């Protein structure tokens, strides 16, 4: 096998590869990685010859909440164990059309409910930098395999409140969360539909831009998909950032943010300045309302999304007995994990008559205000820079001791931009005590170009 | 005793595909669960996509019912666990429905329409080994899941159960004239009726399918509730079910509190903006509505308003049938009379509509013309029309061999013979006993086997006697 490590080299030389040889060696490597770090729920061993295209024969992993035809898709939940979707998600169809090869389904927190990928009855991924530590979540498997793979590969991940940024930051990889509506959600097993975004985790900005070019674009099957023409995002790689205006919000460097991480991020901002960008410190006062509002909207939507899992048509089944209420209650009690049950109960409560106005409807109003605050900022700035995560990758033993509310606070830096649906990228910022930290760049809706420019300008600099 | 009645009508719209997927709505001759896909089965990862044709239909109905159409509308999720729901929530409209504040006039009285909204139909449950309260198990047919429904909610403005039936008939005729629904389809119009009598609480009767059954169910409820109240017993808030076979309502569940459906906006469906252009486009293609048609029938065909209303409100196909007859048959009044009084009676006897029957315009005109040419008498025609509706055989064929065409000369011969045989009656008549002429006419009718018109018989009789 030809030793090609980067995606760019690989796709440029794809014609000279013996596919069967190549893919069997990739699967072998995946199995080795699996035994060490557990990024997968399912490794796909059946491969037809891929189509010719932009990513001919390129190994692609897909987060388990994204439906893949004829390949088990559980969204990390036991209630969907053994579920084989009858159709591909739109992004998977697009990847296959361009010759991508789905090597497996990556592990995640059940339905995306988590920041550390520990809420799973399947594999809990271990951080390749230190197996005692978490890969972040909920797309933990995607970050894990991207960091661990020594073959060309791109991961498809998904974020609702920070599920791409967190694992990218914890595994020292690039993670792009596109603008809401940029990538079709058709085939995504929903967490909170108004905030779910399919995105990419990869080893370089180029890989991110290449995959975004493939999976983005209008999809008639998703009513919330933006009616924009497909475009080639790789053309923004290495573009000059002279004159780029960066906002640095003080709320993102405050209490709860590891000082060492904050310092490292400032170094990165200064690097961008040295490349011709300018920065200014600003305030985003709505930030403090983001977490409660996010959780209310997310659990309200999630609790309705999860109602369909009742053991009648797919997923976990049991011997039919009792009446319908008794039957579905027993299936759901068995199939859902603890965090999932917690969110269903919270969500059902937030939607109840009498609470609905005070919680759900008010949270929607706060979201509108948060969006307005970002919109106002982007009138004067091209990007916002901040740390991706407030902490370095946590040890599993530390996570165990977090109370649910402390756990939710870990999303403080990612929730607001995720709620607003603006695009963001986590860029590896370097190591602290041998552990990776991420620089978070955010831009206005549909301005992924600015993120790609800024991210790629930092590549190769140390 | 004061009472309040209101209804919620669920009308299945006849768009080609379902509300949120491209599955066909035509379930005729389909196996259970054949018209399904990942979207209407609620498979993980599937997303709804609204069928704009359904909104077009909804706007047409809203306009016909004098409602105000929303500028922007949203879909919501109504959550409750029930086996007929593929997602355990129903996509419907809550805060901002398609249209509000309309009315429909029934014999001069306005029944206010509170709201009209679009929603998806749940699957059909097939109860095995009993009815909804006694079945031992239930099968689910998702062919119906995701069918487009229009829910029309009235204010509690009805004063009698009969008025409710008239409302439903007129509404059904409007929907047919708009071409948005098929009356023939199974359970295409389902009604939830609510009724409260002074001193009692509100009772809801769910899911009644026939218009006559709605009237019966409400009448039954009035008697039942009145009885309870007279005995100083409580009428408690509950949901009941109408047993059409036994013509009674049965309790389904007591309602102690308002059900909580935990509505949220459906985040998979973007808001739908209904622009001025959209409304204008619909306005331009609004067809003639029943009330306008009634007025036109009165003017154009000279029939009276009552007749026009019966023809138009019974069934759009009947109105179409009448108009087709009038294209070639000039005595519209006679056609109207025979359609309303005799044809409709025979159709109702068989509980079929004109469309389901074998009656057609050509043979019906033939039938009318048989009377005009005195080939058959009106009296015989009344018998003949039943046979015609039963068999669908053309009236000309039916009378072959039974009626030898009776010429005026033949009739005169018969009359002369009757006069000869009944000299006594003739004498009595000549002495001023008017009644005797009736006796003579009767005798002629017997001899002609009722195949002559009594008016003509009288005319000939009198002329012969005078001679
Ligand atoms: Zn369907």
Image (spheres, rainbow, N blue to C red):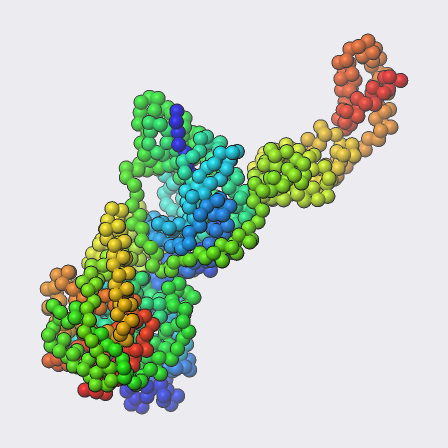
Q: Quadrant of residue B199?
A: top left
Of A276 and B217, nearer the camera is A276
Q: Nearer the viewer, residue B27 or B180?
A: B180
Task: Specify the quadrant that holds the C terminus of chain A.
Answer: bottom left
Q: Residue furthest front?
A: A380
Q: Residue at x 63, y 41 (%)?
A: B296
Point out residue B454 in the picture as x, y percentages from the top left corner.
Answer: 76, 24
Choose top left, top right, bottom left or bottom right for residue A282: bottom left
- Give B300 or A341, whichever is nearer the viewer: B300
Q: Is residue A37 above or below residue A293?
A: below
Q: Is residue A190 visible?
A: yes
Tell me residue B40's x, y (percent).
41, 57
Q: Residue at x 44, y 56 (%)?
A: B274
Is residue B417 visible in the rendered image? The answer is: no
Q: Position of residue B322 (x, y in %)?
A: 65, 41
Work out which residue is located at the far top of the displayed protein and give it: B431
Residue drawn at (49%, 40%), measured in percent from left and top? Answer: B104
């Amino acid at each position: 096998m030809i030793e090609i490590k980067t995606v760019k080299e690989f796709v440029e030389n794809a014609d000279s590869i013996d596919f069967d040889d190549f893919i069997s060696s990739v699967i072998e490597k995946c199995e080795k990685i699996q035994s060490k770090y557990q990024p997968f729920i399912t490794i796909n061993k059946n491969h037809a010859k891929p189509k010719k295209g932009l990513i001919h024969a390129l190994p692609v992993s897909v987060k388990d909440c994204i439906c893949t035809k004829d390949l088990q898709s559980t969204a990390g939940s036991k209630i969907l164990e053994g579920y084989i979707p009858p159709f591909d998600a739109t992004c998977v169809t697009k990847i296959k059309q361009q010759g991508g090869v789905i090597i497996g389904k990556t592990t995640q927190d059940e339905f995306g409910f988590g920041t550390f990928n520990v809420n799973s009855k399947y594999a809990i991924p271990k951080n390749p930098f230190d197996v005692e530590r978490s890969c972040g979540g909920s797309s933990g498997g995607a970050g894990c395999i991207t960091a661990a793979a020594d073959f060309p590969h791109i991961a498809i991940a998904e974020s609702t409140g920070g599920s791409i940024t967190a694992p990218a930051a914890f595994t020292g990889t690039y993670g792009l969360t596109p603008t809401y509506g940029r990538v079709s959600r058709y085939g995504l097993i929903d967490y909170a539909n108004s905030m779910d975004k399919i995105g990419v985790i990869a080893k370089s900005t180029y890989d991110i831009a290449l995959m975004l070019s493939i999976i983005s674009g209008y999809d008639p099957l998703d009513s919330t998909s933006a009616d924009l023409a497909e475009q080639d995002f790789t053309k923004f790689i290495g573009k000059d950032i002279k004159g780029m205006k960066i906002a640095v919000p003080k709320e993102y460097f405050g209490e709860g943010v590891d000082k060492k991480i904050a310092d490292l991020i400032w170094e990165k901002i200064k690097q961008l300045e040295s490349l011709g960008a300018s920065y200014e410190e600003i305030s985003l006062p709505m930030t403090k309302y983001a977490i409660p509002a996010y959780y209310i909207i997310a659990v309200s939507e999630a609790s309705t999304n999860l109602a369909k899992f009742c053991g009648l048509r797919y997923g976990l089944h049991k011997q039919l007995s009792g009446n319908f209420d008794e039957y579905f209650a027993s299936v759901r009690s068995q199939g859902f994990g603890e965090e999932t049950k917690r969110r269903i109960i919270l969500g059902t409560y937030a939607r109840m008559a009498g609470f609905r106005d005070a919680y759900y409807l008010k949270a929607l109003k706060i979201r509108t205000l948060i969006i307005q605050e970002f919109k106002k900022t982007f009138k004067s700035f091209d990007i916002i820079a901040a740390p991706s995560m407030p902490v370095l990758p946590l040890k599993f033993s530390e996570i165990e001791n977090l109370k649910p509310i402390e756990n939710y606070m870990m999303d403080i830096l990612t929730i607001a931009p995720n709620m607003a649906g603006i695009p963001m990228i986590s860029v590896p910022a370097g190591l602290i005590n041998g552990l990776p930290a991420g620089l978070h760049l955010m831009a206005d809706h549909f301005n992924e170009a600015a993120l790609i420019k800024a991210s790629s300008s930092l590549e190769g600099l140390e | 005793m004061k009472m309040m009645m209101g209804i919620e009508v669920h009308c299945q719209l006849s768009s080609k595909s379902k509300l949120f997927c491209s599955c066909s709505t035509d379930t005729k001759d389909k196996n259970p669960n054949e018209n399904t896909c990942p979207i209407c089965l609620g498979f993980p990862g599937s997303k709804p996509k609204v069928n704009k044709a359904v909104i077009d239909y909804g706007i047409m109905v809203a306009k016909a019912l004098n409602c105000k159409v929303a500028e922007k509308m949203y879909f919501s999720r109504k959550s409750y666990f029930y086996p007929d729901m593929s997602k355990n929530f129903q996509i419907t409209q809550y805060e901002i429905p398609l249209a509000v504040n309309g009315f429909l006039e029934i014999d001069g009285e306005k029944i206010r329409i509170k709201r009209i909204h679009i929603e998806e139909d749940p699957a059909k449950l097939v109860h095995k080994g009993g009815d909804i309260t006694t079945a031992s198990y239930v099968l689910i047919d998702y062919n119906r899941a995701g069918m487009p429904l229009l829910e029309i909610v009235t204010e509690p403005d009805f004063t009698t159960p009969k008025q409710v039936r008239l409302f439903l008939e007129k509404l059904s005729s409007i929907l047919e004239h708009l071409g948005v629904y098929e009356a023939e389809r199974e359970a295409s119009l389902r009604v939830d009726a609510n009724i409260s009598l002074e001193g009692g609480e509100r009772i809801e009767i769910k899911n009644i399918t026939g218009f006559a059954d709605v009237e019966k169910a409400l009448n039954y409820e009035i008697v039942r509730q009145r009885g309870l109240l007279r005995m100083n017993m409580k009428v408690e808030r509950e949901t009941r079910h109408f047993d059409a076979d036994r013509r009674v309502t049965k309790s389904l569940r007591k309602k102690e509190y308002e059900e909580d459906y935990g509505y949220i906006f459906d985040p998979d469906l973007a808001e739908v903006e209904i622009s001025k252009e959209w409304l204008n486009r619909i306005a331009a293609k609004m067809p003639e509505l029943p009330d306008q048609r009634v007025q036109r029938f009165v003017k154009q065909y000279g029939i009276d308003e009552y007749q026009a209303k019966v023809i138009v409100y019974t069934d759009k196909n009947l109105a179409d049938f009448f108009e087709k007859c009038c294209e070639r048959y000039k005595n519209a009044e006679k056609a109207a009379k025979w359609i309303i009084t005799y044809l409709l009676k025979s159709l109702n006897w068989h509980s079929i509509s004109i469309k389901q029957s074998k009656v057609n315009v050509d043979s019906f005109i033939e039938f009318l013309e048989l009377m005009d040419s005195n080939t058959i008498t009106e009296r015989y025609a009344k018998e003949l029309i039943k046979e015609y509706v039963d068999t669908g055989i053309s009236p000309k064929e039916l009378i072959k061999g039974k009626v030898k065409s009776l010429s005026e000369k033949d009739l005169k011969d018969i009359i002369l013979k009757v006069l000869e045989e009944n000299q006594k009656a003739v004498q009595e008549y000549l002495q001023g006993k008017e009644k005797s002429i009736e006796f003579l006419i009767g005798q002629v009718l017997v001899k002609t086997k009722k195949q002559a018109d009594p008016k003509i018989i009288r005319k000939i009789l009198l002329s012969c006697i005078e001679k």
